[in-house]
Image (cartoon, helix red, strand yellow):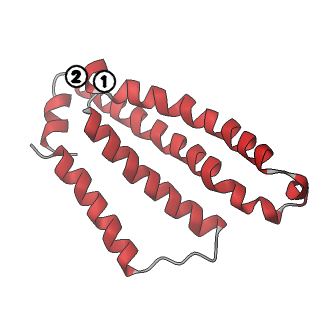
Amino acid sequence: MHNSFIVNCQLETVNCLMKAFYTITLLVLSNTFMTLAWYGHLKFKDMKWSESLGLISVILISWGIALFEYMLQVPANRIGFKENGGPFSLVQLKVIQEVISLTVFVLFSLVFFKTETFRLNHLIAFIFLILAVYFMFKK
């Protein structure tokens, strides 16, 4: 994190760093549930019990999983938001969330979808996202 994060955290360093840690941890967990809700059903075809499921059933299962996403995402944003005493601005929270989302997605797709391949252009794009986080925190 860069200058604006450090300035935001100077007043109550330990409390601020703990809020940043809780925010990021909750966002990682939230995005794990989000990825499962959005893409996990694509692996249902590999499971015998899912053969009789219709689209509405799959949607309801995904919504059930997404409930846990929201149960983690909302507190993460409330804890981390500067106007609630957290260390991050709204835009910073969004950029952090997007990088976490893509990181979780890449790991998920590598573990569960072995047919996906990642190439150099994907790595370069990811580096640009990390640079976006850097510039988001730069004053």
Find residue 93 and report its image quarter.
top left
> Could you tell whether 132 is left or right of 109 in the image?
left
Report the residue that reaches farthest toward the top.
Answer: 84
The three-letter code of the residue at mark 2 reads Glu
Write the residue at 26% across / 25% down.
82
Dot 1 corresponds to which residue? 15
Residue beneath disc 2: 12
Q: Which residue is drawn at 50% across and 55% down?
A: 104
Could you tell me the amino acid type at mark 1? Asn
User: How far across and how far down the image is residue 84, in percent?
Assistant: 31, 19
Dot 2: what SS? loop
Badge 2 density bin: few <14, some 14–19, many ≥20, Cα 10 Å: few
Label 1, residues with CA under 10 Å away: few <14, some 14-19, many ≥20:
some
- In the rendered image, residue 36, in percent from the top left (x then y), is placed at 63, 50
Q: Where is residue 70, by image quadrant?
A: top right
Element assignment for label 1: helix
- Cα separation, mark 2 vs mark 1, equals 5 Å
Q: Residue at x 39, y 49 (%)?
A: 98
